[in-house]
Image (cartoon, grey):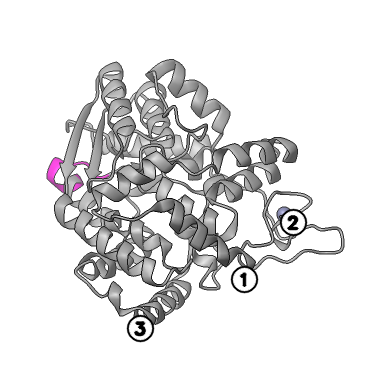
Amino acid sequence: MKRCSKCILPKTFPGISFDADGVCNYCRNYKKIEVKGAPALKEILSKYREIGKNRKYDCMVCYSGGRDSSYVLYQLVKKHGLRVLAVTLDGGLITEFGYKNMERAKNILGVNHEIFILNQKKILKHVGKNIKAWLKKPSLLMIPIFMAADKTMGFELSKIGRQYGIPLLVMGGNTGVENTSFKAGYAGIYEEPNQIKLWQSIKLLKAYFMEYIKNPRYINGSLAYIIPGWFDFFAFQTHNKNFIHYYDYIKWNETDILKTIQEKLNWESPPDTVQTWRTDDATSPWYNFLYYSMTGFTENDELLSNMVREGMISREDALLRVEQENKPRYEEIKKYLKMVNVDIDIYELEKKLKIYQGK
Ligand SMILES: [Zn+2]
């Protein structure tokens, strides 16, 4: 497959074009990631430490046992000496590895950890319904709908913060290098998810609306959280000053993150994959399989391309890595589909979806 000669984005990436030297438009327009820096983070944290003085906690960390949030938890406790409450919202799709890593980190760091079990039965049922709807009419734009179950996270976390009297929430989610702009790219929006502007989010909503018209099978109970989820993500979370993203301040550095959590927290990743990203999320093998089957790339291609542009990895290494990391995790996919009660032959599905690559 033709790929950019500078990064590794393939010709099937939405909105891509190549110049005479084979360099893609994303490389040509790329601006190196600038973070707000350690002093700015320190300033914010001391402000909240002051607020938390007579309280039990200084801040809350949204925690799932994944690579990036594990590092954030470690840094806040060990480097910044904060009294942290680790909070997990579990919609039923956190993996066994996520749980094992959380348990180990909690014991090593001695932090309190609260797990909030959401209405899992209902969430899994709706995910299953949406998968069945999707299978009738596969659409690249609609793949993120399978992740929508946890998108009212902002409201929930804010509520928990009020209950415990903790105003600051630190998120360890993906910003910067780990962006996945191609997901909205299928609606003609080329932005990092948390930098999507309001007018763009409306455009996105409209594109989704059209998909609902084309495939009304999506109109089910899941709308009850997908619509609030839209407000939550694009309006509530992005404008909430008490929510900060750790990696907006400190540059995400995979080598340092992995080294720290493996050495200090005994963090482990599943043996069936070389990938270390989102190993806490049971949905990720599924949606990456869909992207990979239909386009020949996954979110790993975008991550690694950003790492190449940031000078964190060579293009040759990125190519070697992506081939390994993109390998479908069939057994994990089967487990996931069983959880959401969808009975299909994934090898048959793979064959069927590969037809889209030629289009
Ligand atoms: Zn490129």
Q: Amino acid at mark 1?
A: Lys
Tell me the amino acid under the disc marked 2: Lys
| Residue 275 percent location from the top left of the image | 51, 35
Q: Give the residue type at disc 3.
A: Ile
Task: Confirm or deny contact between disc 3 and disc 2 (CB under 8 A).
Answer: no
Measure how far apart labels 3 and 1 are at the Cα level. Answer: 23 Å
Magenta segment boundaries in residue numbering: 161-167
Give the spatial CA distance, label 2 vs label 1. 15 Å
Q: Nearer the viewer, residue 117 or 39?
A: 117
Q: Nearer the viewer, mark 2 or mark 1?
A: 1
Between marks 3 and 2, how big is the CA–CA gap?
34 Å
Ligand 1 under 8 Å from disc 3 Cβ: no
Identify the disc placed on residue 213. 3
Quick one: label 3 or label 1, which is nearer the N terminus? 3
- How crowded pointer 3 is (Cα within 10 Å; few <14, some 14-19, many 20+) is rated as few
Q: Quadrant of ligand 1?
A: bottom right
Please name whichever residue, 328 or 277, is drawn nearer the observer in this view of the structure.
328
**Residue 144 drawn in magenta:** no
Question: Residue beneath label 2, please?
Answer: 2
Q: Circle 2 — which element?
A: loop
Q: Position of residue 110 (x, y in %)?
A: 25, 19
Q: Secondary structure at mark 3?
A: helix
Mark 1 highlights which residue?
A: 359
Instruction: State left or right for residue 257 relative to residue 62.
Output: right
Nearer to the camera, 5 or 353: 353
At numbered mark 1, what does the secondary structure look like: helix, strand or loop?
loop
- Quadrant (top left, top right, bottom left, bottom right) of the N terminus: bottom right
* Label located before the other in sequence (2 or 1): 2
Is residue 314 found left or right of 270 in the rendered image?
Answer: right
First along the sequence among labels 3 and 2? 2
Residue 290 in view in this figure: yes
